[in-house]
């Protein structure tokens, strides 16, 4: 046992966020912590990190019971946390970040050589020797920055490492690097707490799984003894297959068509999306999926070919033109591009409508309550700032923004990235309901089960072009064969 939390209880303003939660982390083991947004996962992490003091309960280390008065106490006890948003200084070197606040000193001066030598040793041990300790963090990829955070923990002799949604911002090929890093940390005997909404990672990496719901411990199980369906039932009370609403419904006229469309990033795109359809778009990172979406939206317009909306050739040279043409776009970066985080739920939900419609404030806001209810937004009220909502509720507000203007075509890029299982079901239901109401949906996703479960057909992109089309229910192997350019036999 590296650390054990016993009967941890924590309340804020009289509201219980954690209730008698037990959790044990053991050497050489990955322990997954799962649950819907609001289940208490983040609060439990903060208790472990010393950022919150529990109202009751005990924290036990091999040497006995401890009480953390702050994060420094937890760090001194060998506990490190890697948050979704990294705690790195971009314009300092890798070595400076690794030893920030603990710089070795020689003859009264910071010993940069010692810092870089030790950083290089740890990077080599992790298998990421391609990172130069002297490089500035700003030059690194997201996966490399994550490796730097791990090296920071190793340099401080951490024995317990908590990782909060570690793959939320990673490309597909970068996730493979994380898998290798986790394996190395297990070899070292580190205890790892792994918080993730992604079922595949939970089952690939963990040996134990703990489920929280509404601040209470639902179950702890060996990963080998539980199925994905059973796990989802424990988290949300619903079976896994209900995540994907049934296909079907009438398919109507062509809403969106590309005819040999291209720009500097994509080429010769020719396909149609009809009213009532959800057309999935698959492909590896860099295949041109998001570049295509941004071109349709007019951020990086097509320079060749034709874009048609409802059979009419349309010049879309910017977002305003896209809205006027009846197009909507849910960006993959909801925090950076999809929302005004310091504005209210109300203001975000009406953001596009205000720009697109003229009229009184009463006309704009009359159906706001119904709009938010239709996407099941959970908030203290319409005036709550969006930055304080969970990832799932933020994504629902993004969808509400587009429902407020009713586009004929909706392009959605990674619609459920970083949201919990329950919120995913809501988003999936909304997209299918919109299609059944006659909207054309073009859905980009890196999650193959989502693409296969939601799509009426799947376009697969490779190297900026459409490599092929697959029918509903196609296998993951068939999608990857087109995405990589290898035959299914080669992939197997």
Image: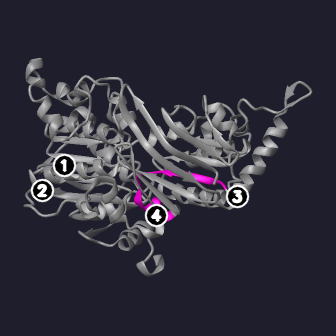
Q: Earlier in the sequence, mark 1 or mark 2?
A: 2
Question: Which of the two discs, 3 and 1, labels the residue nearer the N terminus?
Answer: 3
Callout 2 crowding tier (Cα within 10 Å): few <14, some 14–19, many ≥20: many
Asked if disc 2 and disc 3 are in contact, CB closer than 8 Å, the reply is no
First in sequence, mark 3 or 4: give its number: 3
Q: Residue at x 17, y 54 (%)?
A: 432
Q: CA distance from mark 3 to mark 1?
A: 45 Å
Residue at numbered disc 4 = 203
Marks 1/4: CA–CA distance: 28 Å
Element under disc 4: helix
Q: Is residue 158 above or below residue 68?
A: below
Labelled disc at residue 430: 1
Q: CA distance from mark 4 to mark 2?
A: 35 Å
The crowding category of the residue bearing disc 1, from other C-alpha atoms within 10 Å (few below 14, some 14 to 19, many at least 20), is: some
Query: Image quarter for residue 176?
Result: bottom right
Looking at the rendered structure, which numbered label has been put on residue 276?
A: 2
- Where residue 357 appears, as percent x and y from the top left, is 13, 26
Q: Between tags 1 and 4, which lies in front?
A: 4
* Tag of residue 367: none
Residue displayed at 79% across by 41% down: 116
Give the residue at the far right of this rendering.
107
SS class of the residue under badge 1?
helix
Give the residue number, with chain letter if any, for mark 3: 188
The tag earlier along the polypeptide, 2 or 3, is 3
In front of the other: 22 or 194: 22
């Amino acid at each position: 046992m590296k650390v054990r939390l016993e009967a941890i209880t924590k309340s804020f303003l009289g509201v219980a966020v954690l209730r008698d939660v037990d959790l044990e982390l053991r050497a050489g083991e990955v322990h997954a912590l799962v649950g819907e947004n609001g289940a208490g996962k983040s609060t439990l992490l903060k208790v472990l990190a010393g950022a919150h003091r529990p109202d009751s309960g005990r924290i036990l280390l091999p040497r006995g019971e401890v009480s953390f008065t702050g994060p420094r106490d937890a760090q001194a006890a060998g506990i490190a946390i890697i948050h979704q948003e990294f705690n790195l200084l971009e314009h300092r070197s890798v070595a400076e970040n690794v030893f920030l606040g603990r710089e070795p000193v020689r003859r009264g001066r910071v010993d940069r050589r010692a810092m870089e030598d030790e950083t290089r040793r740890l990077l080599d041990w992790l298998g990421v020797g391609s990172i130069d300790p002297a490089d500035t963090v700003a030059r690194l990829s997201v996966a490399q920055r994550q490796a730097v955070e791990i090296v920071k923990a190793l340099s401080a002799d951490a024995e317990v490492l908590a990782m909060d949604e570690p793959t939320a911002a990673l490309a597909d090929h970068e996730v493979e690097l994380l898998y290798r890093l986790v394996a190395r940390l297990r070899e070292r005997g580190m205890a790892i707490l792994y918080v993730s909404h992604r079922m595949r990672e939970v089952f690939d990496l963990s040996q134990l799984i703990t489920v929280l719901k509404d601040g209470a411990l639902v179950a702890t199980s060996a990963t080998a003894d539980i199925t994905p369906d059973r796990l989802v039932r424990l988290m949300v009370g619903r079976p896994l297959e209900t995540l994907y609403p049934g296909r079907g419904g009438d398919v109507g006229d062509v809403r969106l068509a590309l005819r040999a469309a291209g720009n500097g990033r994509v080429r010769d795109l020719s396909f149609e999306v009809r009213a009532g359809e959800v057309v999935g778009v698959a492909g590896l990172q860099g295949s041109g999926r998001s570049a295509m979406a941004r071109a349709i939206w007019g951020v990086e317009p097509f320079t060749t070919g034709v874009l048609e909306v409802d059979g009419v050739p349309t010049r879309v040279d910017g977002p305003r033109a896209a809205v006027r043409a009846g197009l909507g776009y849910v960006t993959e970066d909801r925090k950076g591009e999809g929302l005004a985080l310091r504005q209210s739920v109300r203001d975000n939900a009406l953001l596009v409508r205000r720009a697109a419609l003229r009229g009184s404030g009463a006309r704009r806001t009359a159906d706001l309550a119904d709009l938010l209810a239709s996407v099941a937004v959970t908030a203290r009220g319409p005036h709550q700032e969006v930055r304080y909502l969970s990832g799932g509720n933020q994504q629902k507000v993004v969808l509400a923004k587009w429902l407020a203007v009713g586009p004929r075509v909706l392009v959605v890029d990674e619609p459920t990235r970083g949201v919990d299982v329950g919120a995913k079901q809501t988003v999936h239901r909304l997209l299918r309901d919109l299609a059944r109401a006659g909207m054309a949906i073009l859905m980009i996703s890196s999650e193959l089960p989502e693409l296969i479960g939601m799509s009426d057909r799947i376009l697969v992109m490779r190297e900026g072009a459409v490599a092929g089309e697959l029918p509903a229910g196609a296998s993951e192997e068939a999608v990857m064969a087109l995405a990589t350019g290898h035959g299914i036999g080669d992939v197997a």
